[in-house]
Image (cartoon, rainbow, N blue to C red):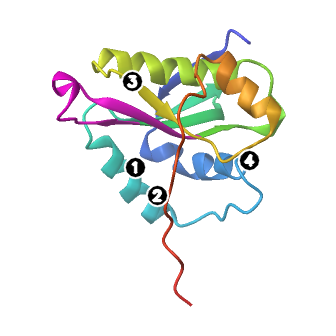
């Protein structure tokens, strides 16, 4: 990893570049309005300890993930964390940026007294699964999801 890589919280001024970066997550990603993105970023930031993290090299966003810390009524009231939308720009893969952004998110979760961090992926690509395992995540549970059917 280059020494110029740094991780920080996203700010409103990052949103255009961040929406471009999300296009490296999925070929079907559709960029949406900056106004909506600003509303969503501000909403995420209202959750104590939660953040959209961005990793940059020489001012360019090359990696990101979203960390949400969720209050909890079990485990002595300790919260848990959810990491979503992990993306590294395709020109910057295998340079350690994805691991570094996950490490930064994990440190924030531990600093927020979370008892666990959950991360899920829809990918079945062996190299992506190996990446998450190498970053310290264990494939240990069965996950389920229910998606809202789009109205036609």
Spatial CA span between label 2 and label 1: 6 Å
In this picture, is 66 found above or below 93? below
Left or right: 100, with 66 as reference point: right
| Secondary structure under the numbered disc 2 in the rendered image | helix
**Sequence-earlier tag: 3 or 1:** 1
> Is 75 part of what is drawn in magenta?
yes
Q: Which mark is residue 37?
A: 2
Dots 2, 1 in contact, CB < 8 A: yes
**Sequence-earlier tag: 4 or 1:** 4
**Sequence-earlier tag: 2 or 4:** 4
What residue sits 55% from the left and 32% below the top?
A: 54
Query: Where does label 1 land, which residue?
Result: 41
Left or right: 26, with 73 as reference point: right
Discs 3/4, front = 3
> Is 71 part of what is drawn in magenta?
yes
Quadrant location of the C terminus?
A: bottom right
Query: Where does label 4 land, which residue?
Result: 24
Mark 4 neighbour class, 10 Å CA radius: few under 14, some 14 to 19, many 20 or more: some
Spatial CA span between label 3 and label 1: 23 Å
What residue sits 73% from the left and 12% below the top?
A: 2
- Where residue 124 sits, quadrant-wise, is top right
User: Magenta segment, which residues?
Assistant: 68-85
- Where residue 56 sits, quadrant-wise, is top right
Spatial CA span between label 3 and label 4: 27 Å
Q: Nearer the viewer, residue 115 or 55?
A: 115
Query: Where does label 3 land, which residue?
Result: 116
In this picture, is 100 found above or below 124? above
């Amino acid at each position: 990893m280059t020494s110029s890589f740094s991780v920080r919280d996203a700010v409103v001024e990052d949103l255009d570049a961040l929406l471009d970066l999300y296009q490296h997550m999925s070929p079907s990603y559709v960029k949406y309005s900056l106004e909506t993105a600003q509303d969503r970023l501000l909403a995420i930031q209202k959750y104590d300890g939660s953040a959209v993290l961005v990793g940059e090299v020489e001012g360019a966003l090359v990696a990101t993930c979203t960390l949400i810390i969720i209050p909890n009524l079990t485990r002595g009231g300790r919260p848990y964390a959810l990491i979503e939308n992990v993306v590294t720009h395709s020109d910057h893969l295998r340079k350690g940026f994805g691991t570094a952004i996950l490490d930064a998110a994990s440190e924030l979760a531990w600093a927020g007294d979370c008892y666990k961090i959950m991360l899920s992926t829809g990918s079945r690509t062996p190299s992506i699964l190996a990446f998450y395992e190498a970053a310290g995540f264990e494939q240990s549970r069965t996950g389920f999801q229910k998606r809202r059917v789009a109205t036609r």
